[in-house]
Image (cartoon, grey):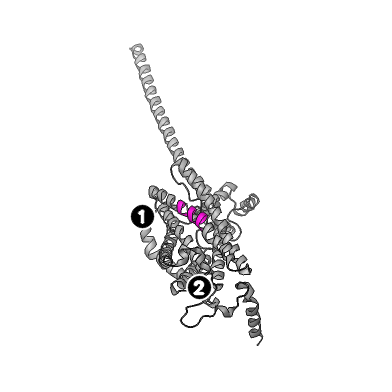
Amino acid sequence: MNMTRMEALLNEWLWQEEYWLPPGISWRDTEMEQGEGHFPLPRDLIYTLPLAFVFIVLRYVFERIIAIPFSKCLGVKDRVRVRVPFVPKLETFYKHNSRQPSQSEVVSLEKQCGLSQRKIQTWFKHRRNQDRPSNTKKFCEASWRFVFYLISFTAGLCSLINTPWFWDQRECWTGYPKQPVADVHYWYYMLEMGFYLSLLLSISVDVKRKDFKEQVIHHIATLFLLSFSYCANYVRVGTLVMLVHDSSDFLLESAKMLHYAVWTRTCDSLFIVFAVVFLVTRLVVFPTRIIHTTMVASLDLYQPFFGYYFFNALLLVLQALHVFWAYLIVRMAFKFAFMGKVEKDERSDAESEVDENEEEEEESEEEGDGCNWEQKKEVINSKSTSLAKNCVLNNLTNQRNINSRLPKAR
């Protein structure tokens, strides 16, 4: 009885009409008769959780059956990393304390292990590089996202191109909130939310990049946006938001795949296409078409309410992330213009700067070792040559001394 009463109080508080619906409209006004169509219900969102686990399983199978063989066909190569010797105390500290010990911690470890500070710092550097994801792993992750975004964008465009709100965004509010949802748009919502939920669940094991925090915020804001828009029947606006995002995401993931395969020219060309599509859709279409219709055009029909402010706040969070990523893309565009090639994916392709610097240092050390070996070979050769010359000179000198003594003996 108490649980039932608490559930009733929660529903009464959570589903208050002033939170979800414009003033003067009740939940009864949204009821549809049989045959009119399907009205979005909050309980439909429960299906996104099993869909997320289905996506995780499909990704596991896809990466091992399709992505890995495909990476070999494209010529993706993994860097051979130095395997550090197993030191129990250093390994325990690495896993349970910190991957980057401070100077005081290095001194403490020096006393415990009996190794010099330089050897301990070198061990941690190689150990961090040892855990860095391989190019094959990053290629598999990018290929999985590429396939989903491409299919999602193609299916979404086919389902929306004949709708009136695709061409005139003011049609998003015609008949609101009593707007039936087509089956294709229902599944468009469920699959998209299930996919983003799967990304959020697996983000701890995915490749961590510079914009890791921004990616987490993006996934959470997207899930909140889609969930709220579905419950409040902002489905028409929500489908446009998903389509705009998918239009450039599959280009980004395809550019990453070619980057890992070292198809430099094709990758650079595809990056230019991605940059143009991203800047146009995220900085022009999204604010002028979608945000404008939710913040301005909707006021011609309804007065502001809680759902109006909450929904637009989420859209502005996404727009702030768009501006942040656009800044990184413009930086890359300048590098491409002045240097003639795209060195890094400033948006999300590179891991933390510390790991990148360590890998560069490791490469320079290897090159330095090679240079030292060449120098040593030259020194050895020069010494052997001079030694041989000295031996010849000594023999000639001894021979002359012998010849000069022969007449005296006679």
| Residue 265 in view, yes or no | yes
| Residue 362 in view, yes or no | no
Dot in front, 2 or 1: 2
Q: Amino acid at mark 2?
A: Thr
In the image, residue 34 above or below residue 256 = below
For the record, the magenta segment spans 275-285
Q: Position of residue 245 (x, y in %)?
A: 48, 60
Residue that mark 2 sits on: 48
Q: Residues within 10 Å of mark 1 (few under 14, many from 20)?
A: some
Q: Amino acid at mark 1?
A: Leu
Residue that mark 1 sits on: 74
Callout 1: helix, strand or loop? helix
Q: Position of residue 405 (x, y in %)?
A: 36, 14
Callout 2: helix, strand or loop? helix
Query: Residue at left 45%, top 57%?
Result: 248
The N terminus: image quadrant: bottom right
The C terminus: image quadrant: top left
Q: Residue furthest front?
A: 300
